[in-house]
Image (cartoon, rainbow, N blue to C red):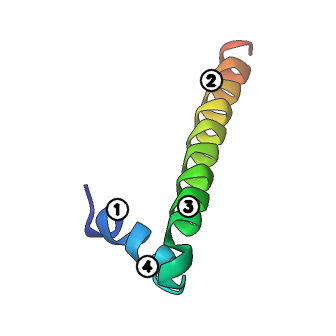
């Protein structure tokens, strides 16, 4: 685990006012999960394309 993995959520939520912290945290987590799913889908698509040739 790199140091950036631990600090990225803190840096992403830093400009959000305290009253909106829950909303900002939810948005950050949603985007993190979407990125993870997109990465898995891309990996599978590349693996399937290379296996077919």
Give the foreground label among 4 and 2: 4
Residue 2 lies in quadrant: bottom left
> For numbered disc 1, what is the local secondary structure?
helix
The quadrant in which the C terminus is found is top right
- Residue topped by disc 4: 11
Categorize mark 4 by other alpha carbons within 10 Å: few (<14), some (14-19), many (20+).
few
Give the foreground label among 2 and 1: 1
The x and y percentages for residue 26 are 56, 57
What separation in Å lies between label 2 and label 1 (alpha carbons)? Answer: 26 Å
Give above or below for 16 relative to 4.
below
What separation in Å lies between label 1 and label 4 (alpha carbons)? Answer: 11 Å
Identify the mark at residue 47; answer none if there is no mark.
Answer: 2
- Residue topped by disc 1: 5
Single out the residue that lies furthest toward the top: 52
- Residue topped by disc 3: 28
Categorize mark 1 by other alpha carbons within 10 Å: few (<14), some (14-19), many (20+).
few
> For numbered disc 4, what is the local secondary structure?
helix
Q: How many numbered tags mark residues here? A: 4
The x and y percentages for residue 5 are 34, 62
Identify the mark at residue 51; answer none if there is no mark.
Answer: none
The quadrant in which the N terminus is found is bottom left
Give the foreground label among 1 and 3: 3
Q: Image point 56% across, 68% down: which residue?
A: 24
- Relative placement, left or right, of 23 versus 13 is right
Give the foreground label among 3 and 2: 3
What separation in Å lies between label 1 and label 3 (alpha carbons)? Answer: 13 Å
Q: Image point 73% across, 12% down: which residue?
A: 52
> For numbered disc 2, what is the local secondary structure?
helix
What separation in Å lies between label 3 and label 4 (alpha carbons)? Answer: 11 Å
Among the two numbered marks 4 and 2 on one chain, the one whose residue lies closer to the N terminus: 4
């Amino acid at each position: 685990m790199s140091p950036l993995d631990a600090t990225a959520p803190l840096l992403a939520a830093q400009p959000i006012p305290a009253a909106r912290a829950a909303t900002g945290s939810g948005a950050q987590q949603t985007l993190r999960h979407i990125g993870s799913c997109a990465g898995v889908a891309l990996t599978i698509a590349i693996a399937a394309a290379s296996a077919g040739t």
